[in-house]
Amino acid sequence: MVYFVYLILLYSLLLLFLLLFIFIFLMVRKTYNHYFSIRNKQFKEMVSNELITFITGKETMPSRLFHQQGKWKREVILDILYDLASTLKSEEERMRINEICKEIGVDSELEQKIQHSEEWWIVAESIRKVGRLRLLELLPLVESNLTHSHYEVWTSAERVLLELRQSSTVIQYIVTNQTSLCEEKLTRLIAILLTKSVKCDHHYILAHFQNAVPLVKKMFIQLIAKQQTYQALPLLESLLDSEDSENRIVALKAIGELRITLNENKILAFFESQVWEERMVASRVVQNCSIRQAIPQLVQLLADSQWWVRLRAAEALFSFGKDGIKELNWCIEHHQDPFTRDIAKKVLEDKELEVYRG
């Protein structure tokens, strides 16, 4: 019995010492982190103004800052540069940040990691740092990693190129390699491209459109709409005769976003399409291009078998003001089809609520 009591006491003491050790460790670590946090903050406050005045062109380079030993000081300077690079106002400011990066050896370090590191996460992170610091001189290295095997690396490379306004480089890579890239990668490259502000010369689009694979053709059409490239309108309207329904729908959407058409009758013909998505998109095109002669056909579409077609037709009618609203009210009071009455009522109520909410 006494033996067990001693054993329990021993375990209790061991547990107490363990808890005391953990407490001391946490306190030391907290003190350690607090010390370095204050140290970094003080150094950052000391050098921020000097860096800002140099980058904005008011002073010469404060070289004394960069000859001090200490990796932590270099990291603090880098943090400041990241913040400043995100608010650049001129090419001169970018060049001055580039000078500082060279002075502290950041550019050569990033170049080395991108070229020679065998760890994909190091390459990807280095590419992102190139983007954050706006190091345009390293863009050829970033571009070369569009061919990297790892998803995180080539997507990081594409995003950095797009952020640094090198969209033409990405587009040329896609067009040049469209037949050799797997569908998954090609789809992802295009998806990322279309989320950014992109510029693509319409002559380039027209020159490469016919020989492009379907995914790239769709990309070109979306770029035309995104950039409001009116010079490519004849190309879009020629696609309305395509045998591929997806091509016709994408072309219709692009015409709707351009808000202009050279052939209203061709648009109206889609109200008779057997593909309900085409009837739906045609209603939006009619609305955006203000094709008022479509009002009678839009009224007929209010009785369409597809809810989305009825909704878009009702919204298009409302967009024509007094004439369209008159037709919607007539449908609510007199149309025999209950679905037609419901959709007309829904759109009028929704639009009135929008006006009420301001």
Image: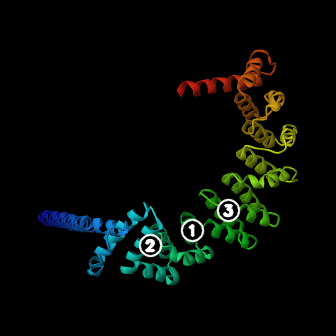
Q: Is residue 223 above or below residue 274?
A: below
Percent from the top left, x then y, of residue 96?
40, 72
- Mark 2 or 3, closer to the camera: 2
Disc 2 residue crowd, few under 14, some 14–19, many 20+, Cα 10 Å? some
The answer to whether marks 2 and 1 mark residues whose Cβ atoms lie closer than 8 Å is no
Q: Amino acid at mark 2?
A: Met
Q: Identify the mark at residue 245; answer none if there is no mark.
A: none
Whole-number angstrom distance, CA of label 2 to CA of label 3 = 26 Å
Q: Amino acid at mark 1?
A: Leu
Residue that carries the numbered disc 3 in the rendered image: 200
Q: Is residue 244 left or right of residue 192?
A: right
Q: Amino acid at mark 3?
A: Cys
The numbered mark, 2 or 3, whose residue comes first in the sequence reads 2
Residue that carries the numbered disc 2 in the rendered image: 95
**Image quadrant occupied by the N terminus:** bottom left
Percent from the top left, x then y, of residue 309?
76, 35
Count of labels in the image: 3
Badge 1 element:
helix
- Residue for point 79% across, 31% down: 292
Residue that carries the numbered disc 1 in the rendered image: 161
Percent from the top left, x then y, of residue 151?
58, 69
- Mark 2 or 1, closer to the camera: 2
- Mark 3 or 1, closer to the camera: 3
Q: Is residue 160 left or right of residue 290?
A: left
Q: Is residue 109 above or below residue 254?
A: below
Badge 3 element:
loop
Percent from the top left, x then y, of residue 347?
67, 27
